[in-house]
Image (tube, rainbow, N blue to C red):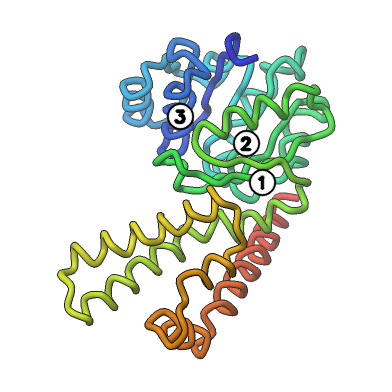
Amino acid sequence: MTESLKIAFIGLGQMATALASGFVRANVVKPENIYGFDVAHDSAAKFADTIGASTFDSPVKAIENASVVVFAVKPQHMGGALSPIRDAIANEPGKALFISIAAGLPISYFENALGKSIRLARVMPNTPCLVGEGASGFALNESVKPEDGAIVKTLLETSGLAYELPETLLDAVTGLSGSAPAYVFMAIEALADGGVKAGLPRAIALDLAAQTLKGGAEMYLKTKRHPGALKDSVTSPAGTTIAGVAALEARGFRSALIEAVVVGAERSRELGKNYR
């Protein structure tokens, strides 16, 4: 399925580089079958050096031989990126599978810009894709081929987890996996501060906090035991952990995280209205 893939990236920033690196690392796409375009020459040069890809001086040239085109530019710049492509694909709008990783831009935005018959996947990735530990949700439009969903999933899973969902749920994905890396970083910092207050050196406290969060996440992902059961397994009667759990509950720890996800999803919906 992936042996014949030729992938073009429009926009060659960190996320494009992370995704392309994952494709190559997983032997899903060969470097010589990756193409790119970016208005910033420095970004294009860095992408070419990192991936071993070919870059071009126009988006039309970059997508000319591509079977998959990834839009990795910021939402406010997407209109300018799509404009020259519209004419280039006018005679064969279904030739390539388009993938957008631009936050907030709905499928209808691309269909209005490029035509209803384009094959499109809208993806909500997150920044841990940069280290191969991403969590992504994606939605497909009605023009996709039966195999397109499998292609998108295979590509995204080179950088982490990926789930196909109805487009209406991508705002929830944004509120959860899209925004929550920031909450994880806050948790690492706060836990480390607690360690420092208890007497640990800062560098060691940070490493212990980060590894503990990583280890806890891996325990759930590998065992699929309910998080409550995993929590109970380390919470001894009258012990240190239950004392800490009680302190967190008294300060609204879980309700704060729930609310953060909900307001993030609501904000994503609000931002998306600007492009519908």
Dots 2 and 1: beta carbons under 8 Å? yes
Name the spot of residue 221 as percent of width and height, x first.
54, 50
Mark sitting earlier along the chain (3/1): 3
Indicate the amino acid at tag 1.
Leu
Q: Which residue is labeled 3 in the image?
A: 22
At x 48%, y 56%, the residue is 217
Q: Viewer-proximal residue, 206 or 268?
A: 206
Position of residue 102 in the picture relative to residue 25 (left or right): right
Indicate the amino acid at tag 2.
Ser
Dots 3 and 1: beta carbons under 8 Å? no
Q: Residues within 10 Å of mark 1 (few under 14, many from 20)?
A: many
Marks 3 and 1 sit apart, C-alpha to C-alpha, by 24 Å
Mark sitting earlier along the chain (2/1): 2
At x 64%, y 59%, the residue is 268
Mark sitting earlier along the chain (3/2): 3
User: Does any portion of residue 259 appear in the rendered image?
Assistant: yes
Position of residue 203 in the picture relative to residue 29 (left or right): left
Name the spot of residue 17 as percent of width and height, x first.
42, 31
Q: Which residue is labeled 1 in the image?
A: 105
Task: Name the element at disc 3.
Answer: helix
Marks 3 and 2 sit apart, C-alpha to C-alpha, by 17 Å
Picture layout, residue 66 above or below residue 205? above
Q: Which residue is labeled 2 in the image?
A: 100
Marks 2 and 1 sit apart, C-alpha to C-alpha, by 8 Å
